[in-house]
Image: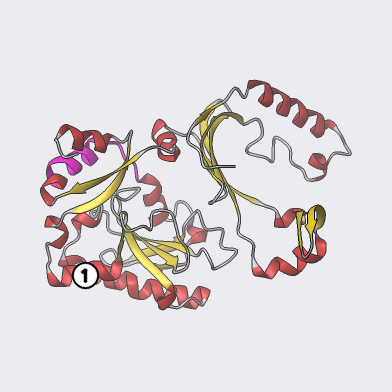
Amino acid sequence: MAESGKREVDFADRNETDAAKAKRLKNDPNSDQDNHNNSASENPLFGFKTTTVLRDSAREKNMFVHGKLNDQDAVIILEKTPIREDTLLEIFNGSRLKLDMRNDIYSTYQLQPPAHLNEIKTTVVCPATEKHVKKYLRQETYLVQETGEDYRSITLPYIQSQSFSVQWVYNILEKKAEAERIVYEDPDQDVGFVLLPDFKWDQKQLDDLHLIAIVHRRDIKSLRDLTALHLPLLTNIRKLGEESILKRYGVAASKLKVYLHYQPSYYHLHIHFNALSYEAPGCGVEHAHLLSDIIQNLQADSQYYHSRSLSFPLRADEGLLSKFKDAGKL
């Protein structure tokens, strides 16, 4: 499966066939589907009708699919989970192998592991808006260089004009959602935060460790808002975040990447904690800023991020890119 962009496909016949097959299997008392209780009442994806493959990647082993779920637009993200060291014995001893090729000392097989070791991590966005669909669609990207004045005259007015809801973030902070996932919390409303696993991390291995620190303060949208007045907040997050990860997961600070995105995916200050060896999406130099660098820059100049030019990528269909083009900046 090569990396690809949006694929428009006629899935009507396939969806009809799949639905008929699912119905037949459901009514068959000897079927695997019945044995595993995989029915419409227990499978939230039952009846999903695929219309578009937005993006797929053989390297990252994932696929983003747009379709209909209960007559609502939905985006389904399918990701193959990494192989864990603690499952190797069971994989080697409990799998079925089919020989593909043998030549001298080399042989290749198709290995079918036990079902519980062959899971696909699945994320459901429903109902999905047009913004969600565009977010996951592979598109041409452009690198934009934004001066401090560009931010105030182009980017900030654009952000303020858009309905970028962060209610889901407030739900986490107020314990209305995902409270059981919180790894650590400093409840101080000025320098406090909650720390919880990023939804892309399945928490089954440490190689791709990824946690998010979300600040309690609601007046900081992004890196551009930070001044030296926020140093106590930033240093507190770094210190307590690293200590919490060491205590909970046994991963030392020297094995972590701690950074912010600019532009962020949502406009409420949050900080990423990644395993150093993990190449997380968006951790490249054009997108990520190390927290240690941010702290040092603000210690040297309180207004550093108010005046400094910052570069970041934008997709071809993003409204902010059009604003920069209209202003003759690209």
The reply to whether residue 186 is in sight is no
What residue range appears in magenta?
Answer: 152-166
Which image quadrant is residue 212 in? bottom left
Number of marks in picture: 1
The residue located at (24%, 66%) in the rendering is 294
Q: Which residue is mark 1?
A: 231
Q: Residue furthest front?
A: 104
Q: Is residue 259 left or right of residue 197?
A: left
Which image quadrant is residue 96 in? bottom right
Q: Amino acid at mark 1?
A: Leu
> What secondary structure predominates along the stretch shown in magenta?
helix
Q: Which corner quadrant holds the N terminus?
A: top right
The residue located at (42%, 54%) in the rendering is 172
Q: Which corner quadrant holds the C terminus?
A: top left
Q: For the residue labelled by badge 1, is the local secondary structure a helix, a strand or a loop?
A: helix
The residue located at (68%, 21%) in the rendering is 13
Front residue (pair 159, 109): 109
Please say which color scheme the image uses.
secondary structure
Residue 127 image offset from top left, x and y in percent:
49, 34
Front residue (pair 24, 305): 305
Q: Is residue 328 above or below residue 174?
A: above
Q: Is residue 164 magenta?
A: yes
Q: Residues within 10 Å of mark 1 (few under 14, many from 20)?
A: some
Q: Is residue 205 magenta?
A: no
Q: Is residue 188 above or below residue 263?
A: below
Residue 283 image offset from top left, x and y in percent:
38, 58
Front residue (pair 103, 18): 103
The reply to whether residue 297 is in sight is yes
Front residue (pair 189, 55): 55
The residue located at (28%, 71%) in the rendering is 292
Residue 38 image offset from top left, x and y in percent:
74, 41
Q: Is residue 215 above or below residue 235?
A: above
